[in-house]
Amino acid sequence: MPLFFPHEDPSDVRNRYKPEVIKGDMDSVRKDVLDFYSNLGTEIVDESHDQDTTDLHKCIAYIRDVTPNIDKSNLCILVAGALGGRFDHEIGNINVLCSFSSTRIILLSDDCLIHLLPRTHHHEIHIQPSVEGPHCGLIPIGTPSRSTTTTGLEWNLDNTEMSFGGLVSTSNIVKEEKITVRSDSNLLWTISIKKQ
């Protein structure tokens, strides 16, 4: 957070934007960082006993558990810094999208965003051209797609088959501010983020 406010004292920024909860297996956080936030009143939830799920999985589960019993289909979770590091961590984060397919989770990096388009829905994606695009992609995840159809792209798909080892729609271009996608497979939607 201090990088977003380069002209302010980093301690002031950390005090102002403190997390309510830090949850994970605690294998990569320094003790002084935990102590700092614990002293600010942040709840520390050590789940080092659980080595079968990632820290992101633990955090998404926590958010879903503490969200009031309202319609959780309206819940949207933005995960900053989820891409651009180790490839195995990125794949683990993409796996979380599939594990929580009924929750809208957006993985965000400096260069792009990714979210899951479940096969159970017809999707309308509204592009914000001032910050997104033009490069985009649709990638089948879990199973190949026997039929994917789109509108609003430079190279639309028309009942197109997609699979790893075959066609995947990478390096496509958004041409309209509304993209529609229908597929018989879960797809990853990715779009570039413009540098400000």
Image (spheres, helix red, strand yellow):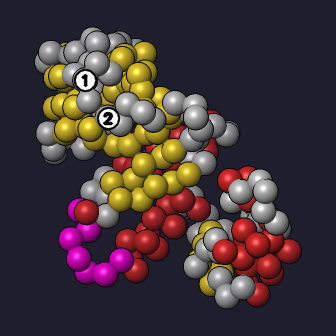
The percent coordinates of residue 92 (x first, y second) are: 53, 47
Given the image, on which type of amino acid does mark 1 rest?
Glu
Separation of disc 1 and disc 2 at Cα? 8 Å
151 left or right, relative to 154: left
* Image quadrant occupied by the N terminus: bottom right
The percent coordinates of residue 7 (x first, y second) are: 79, 56
The percent coordinates of residue 12 (x first, y second) are: 76, 72
* Label 1 secondary element: loop
Q: Quadrant of residue 153?
A: top left
Which span of residues is magenta-colored?
A: 67-73
Which label number is shown at residue 127? 2
* Label 2 secondary element: loop
Above or below, 10 relative to 133: below
Q: Quadrant of residue 156?
A: top left
Above or below, 90 relative to 66: above
* Image quadrant occupied by the C terminus: top right
Of the image marks 1 and 2, the number of the one nearer the N terminus: 2
At label 2, counting other C-alpha atoms closer than 10 Å, the crowd grade (few under 14, some 14-19, many 20 or more) is some
Given the image, on which type of amino acid does mark 2 rest?
Ile
The percent coordinates of residue 38 (x first, y second) are: 73, 84
Which residue in the structure is indicated by mark 1? 176
Q: Residue at x 38, y 43 (%)?
A: 115
